[in-house]
Amino acid sequence: MSRNKARTVAMQALFQLDKHPEGVAGVIEARASEERLDENDLLYLDKVTRSVIANRERIDDFIRSYSIDWDITRLGRVERSILRLAIGEMIYLADIPVSVAINEAVKLAKKFGSDQAAKFINGVLGKFSRNHIDEAGQPRASTI
């Protein structure tokens, strides 16, 4: 399976967990089984999903900071899930380049989000990365 597909599955898992984050283990297991993920993709799904859920409040604070004139509760669940996934990748998955996390988030937004979602997500993630990711693509410890 490709990382693109695994990323889509992770976004869908985060979408499912938006209202009930305590069910993370069951959602990961169900999504992995439904999609027949290979070992590497299952590791990615598990790591990114658990990282986002464990740090969701902090990630949501970043989203609030950079989504000007948009309260996080007004964002669609799809858009919220995509933003959480991308920021989670940037902070917790050092092997994924920031540009890849942003580009893949924009692709997900075009596929699953509302009409203006891709531009909005690109803007939020661009601002986040400029302020919290260093030139080497690593989170700035002083800001994360």
Image (cartoon, rainbow, N blue to C red):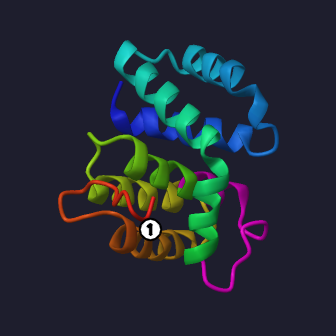
Q: Which residues are magenta?
A: 67-82
Residue found 43% across the figure and 35% down from its top: 5
* Residue 60 found in image quarter: bottom right
As for residue 71 lying within the magenta part, the answer is yes
Indicate the quadrant containing the N terminus: top left, top right, bottom left or bottom right: top left
Q: Is residue 48 visible?
A: yes
The location of residue 112, given as percent across then percent down, is 58, 54
Q: Main secondary structure of the magenta part?
A: loop
Q: Which residue type does callout 1 highlight?
A: Leu
Residue picked out by circle 1: 125
Is 66 displayed left or right of 93 in the figure? Answer: right
Quadrant of image for the C terminus: bottom left
For residue 65, side relative to residue 93 (left or right):
right
| Total marks placed | 1
- 110 drawn magenta: no
Residue furthest toward the bottom?
69
Q: Quadrant of residue 44?
A: top left
Name the residue rendered at 28%, 54% in the picture: 138
**Vertical relation: 143 (above or below) 41:** below
Task: Examine the image and state in which quarter residue 76 appears.
Answer: bottom right
Q: Give SS at disc 1.
A: helix
Q: Position of residue 92 (x, y in %)?
A: 41, 42
Instruction: Identify which residue is drawn at 60% across, 45% down.
Output: 55
- In-image side of 6 versus 114 (left or right): left
Q: Is residue 112 visible?
A: no
- Crowd around label 1: few <14 · some 14–19 · many ≥20 (10 Å): many
The percent position of residue 134, horizontal first and vertical second, equals 25, 64
Horizontal side of residue 37 vs 68, given as left or right: left
Residue 61 image point, x, y percent: 63, 64
